[in-house]
Image (cartoon, rainbow, N blue to C red):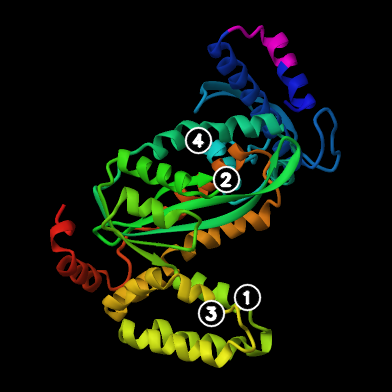
Amino acid sequence: MDPAKKNIVSELIKTYDIKTAKDIQEALKDLLGETLQDMLEAEMNEHLGYEKYTRDDESNNYRNGYKTKKVRSSMGELEINVPQDRDSEFEPQIVKKRQKDISEIEQKIINLYASGMSNKTIIEEIEDIYGFELSESLISDITDKVIPKIEEWKNRPLDPIYPVIYIDAVHFSVKDSGIVKKRAAYIVLGINKDGVKEVLGMYIGDAESSKYWLSILNELKNRGLKDIIILCADGLSGIKESINAAFPNTEYQRCIVHQVRNTLKYVSYKDKKEFASDLKSIYLSNNEEQARQNLDAVDEKWSEKYPNAMKSWYVNWDCITPIFKFSPQTRKVIYTTNAIESLNSQFKRLNRSRSVFSTKLSLEKALYLSIERISRKWTHPIRNWGVIFGELSIMYEERIGY
């Protein structure tokens, strides 16, 4: 534990004579009440333009005692003393007039955390608004309240079948024993039978292997998932073998967008536009036979200049070709990243706002809150889902009828 936090905890235990979990709750409740009180005083200072126990001779308005008020919070009922002014013009913002429930204050802190702000930045934001500095431990206590929700979310039941599932990775910097390391957060995103997106799970950090992916797929099975029609992912180590073991009937489709990006890494900037256009002739082909002919043509054209660029297309051809059995509408859902882009953009905001996460848990909290925020918007089916589902229902009639 951080020495500063350790001192705070020791002082808290000593001051409140903490012996039980209930004592901790009461202590935090008391601290929240004092925090609110100080913030109200700061608001009154701002309203009058001078500090408590001082006076502005040019103003006829001044402090005029307090009004006791009971409010509900997620820590229980609190009693606070709201400062009053002589002219009754004071309109507190932290606890508004006639407001009886302040739990949204904690929600505001959680929302700031979900947007990627670090505890330090949240402290600065609150101080800028209210002129009062919250402690990092209080912010951690508030955001830690989502931990039981994360565990419940991780273990919730899943639908028996998802027509399409994507697995994608986003990388973050996380402190581990005082050393900053890059950790991958793997997100499993499903399209359910209604065509609505749903994040099925998030997994942080272990090394990729067939054993690792099999454990994840088995966890999804244990939560009720019986079948996946198409699973789209980049070339994750061991994923193909794991899919064959856990869901032997599932079509494993290499993500074409990632395949193209990985190919263009070998290509100089001046040739990328032309090379990318040539690659389209492969994955937009009418059928697999034509695609193979176009693959050979692209390889012949560029192999002398970029001998390694097209190797992965040949090595992974069996995982690239499933798209050729589908119509253009269905192909587009499989080979593009549109379904997961809105989620990835939210995660990129986390990376921009917070260069390093202090712990794996802090990253997990931020990811969960981001997922919760973005998934509220997923209320409608993806584009052309009626046509796509109709096609899948015919091609996989016996399986899609769960």
Q: 268 or 386, which is in the foreground?
A: 268
Q: In whole angstroms, how far apart are the C-alphas of marks 3 and 4?
A: 46 Å
State the CA–CA distance, disc 4 to disc 1. 40 Å
Indicate yes or no whether the magenta region holds residue 74: no
Q: Earlier in the sequence, mark 1 or mark 2?
A: 2
Q: Is residue 331 left or right of residue 23?
A: left
Q: Is residue 3 left or right of residue 145?
A: right
Q: Amino acid at mark 2?
A: Gly
Which residue is label 3 attached to? Answer: 310
Q: Is residue 101 visible?
A: no
- Decide whether residue 16 is among the magenta residues: yes
Residue 109, image x, y percentages: 59, 41
- x%, y% of residue 311? 53, 76
Label whose residue precedes the other's in the sequence (2 or 3): 2
From the viewer's perspective, is residue 291 above or below residue 102? below
Q: On screen, 190 above or below 120?
A: below
Magenta range: 10-19
Q: Can you identify the residue that label 4 sits on?
A: 146
